[in-house]
Amino acid sequence: MQEYKFIQNRICDAETHGVGVLSMILAWFGAGLVARCKSQQSSHDRAGLCLPLGDEIAANREIEMSLVQSAAVLRARAGALAPGILMAFTIAAAARFISEHYGAPAMLFALLLGMAFNFLATDGKCVAGVQVASSQLLKIGVAFLGVRVTLDQISSLGPVLVLVIPVLIIFTIGAGLLFSKLFNRSVSFGLLTGGAVAICGASAALAIAASVLPKSETSQRDTLFTVVAVTSLSTMAMIIYPILFSSLGFTDTQIGVLIGATIHDVAQVVGAGYAVSELAGDTATYVKLLRVACLPIVILLLAAFLRRGAAGGAKTPFPWFAVAFAAILLANSIGLIPSFAAESMDWSSRWLLLGAISALGMKTSLKEMFDLGALHIGVVVAETVFLCAAAIAAISFI
C-alpha cells in the first residue's frame, strides 16, 4: 500500500508543478510495475513458494527512486526552458496579430519585436529557452514544411519546369558566392543569402544557418540580416513584379511561373499571383512549392560540401531535419498522413518558425544590424535582380 501512495504522491507532484504528460506516464508506468510485482508475490505466496522479500522490496525502491529522479530532471529542465520559450511565442502571437490587422509579413514583425527584447536573451531566466526556440524548435518547424508539398503538385508543372527551377536555384546560389566575393563578404554569407533568395526566403535562411553553416561571431547577425532583407524585398516584389511581368507581355501562366520562381517568401508569392488572376496564382503557388521541395536537397549537398572541406576535423552536424522534410513530403504524397494530421503539422510549422524567428530577434542587437553597412544589402539586392533576370530569360525560351 505504501508503494501506491508513493506513486500517487509523485503524480500529484507532477500535476502541481506542471511537469507534463511525460512525467505522469512515467509515474503510472512505475505504479504498474509495483502492482505486477505485488501480484507475482501474492501468487507465489498462495502456491507456498516464498521469495526473498528483501530483494523484491529493494528492487521496488530502486524503480521508485528512478522515477523520482526522472521527474525531478524533467521538472528542472521544463523550469529552465519555459520562460524563454513562452516569451518567444508571446512575441510570435503579437506579430501574428499585427500582421493580420495591417497586412504585413508576420516574420518581419516577429523579428523586429524580438529585437526590442534583446536584453532578455543575454542574461536571466529566458536564455536557455530562447536558445532552444531558435535552434531545436526551428528545425522541427522546417521539417514540418514538407507537409505543404506533394509529388503530384510537382509533377503537374511538367518536366521542363521541374528541370528549370533547380537550375535557377543552382545558378542563384553560385551568383551569391560570386557577389559575396565582389562585395568583400564571406563565403558563408554568400551561401546564406544565395540559398535564401533561391529557395524560400526566410525559412531557407533559417534552415541553412541552423544546419550547415559554421558558427561564428557574425553568423547569427548575418542570418537575421538575411531574414530582414529577403522579407522586405519579397514585399516590394509582390507589388512590382506583377506590373513588370504584365508590361513585358507574358501570359497569365508565364506570369505565374515567373512570380513563383523569383519572389522569396511563400506568402508574397500567393499574394502577387492571385493579384493577377486565379490561373497565375495557382501556377505561382505550385512553382514556389517546387522551390521549397528543393530545400532538403540543397541543405544535404551544402552539408556534404562543407563537411568535406572542414579543416582540422571540425565537421558540421548532419541535417537530419532535412531528411525528415523529405520523408514527410513522400509520406504526404502517398497518402500516409491523414488530412487532419497534415493540417496540424502545417499549422505547427508556421508557429514554430514564427517562434524561432522571434527568438532569433531576441538574440540580436539592433545596433549590430545597423553596423553591417550597405555592402550586405548590395549582395542580396544583386542576387534578387540576378534571379529575376535569369527567370525571365528562361521563360522566354521555354
Image (cartoon, rainbow, N blue to C red):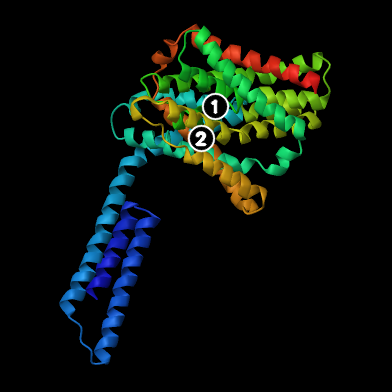
Residue type at tag 1:
Ala
Tag 2: Cα neighbours inside 10 Å, few (<14), some, or many (≥20)?
many
**Residue closer to the observer: 376 or 159:** 159
Distance (Cα) linking label 1 and label 2:
9 Å
Q: Quadrant of residue 289?
A: top right
SS for tag 1?
Answer: helix
Q: Are marks 1 and 2 in contact (CB under 8 Å)?
A: yes
SS for tag 2?
Answer: helix
Quadrant housing the N terminus: bottom left
* Residue 168 % position (x, y): 66, 23
Classify 190 as above or below 127.
above
Residue type at tag 2:
Leu
* Residue 276 % position (x, y): 78, 25
Which numbered dot is residue 202? 1
Which numbered dot is residue 37? none
Q: Which residue is mark 2?
A: 353
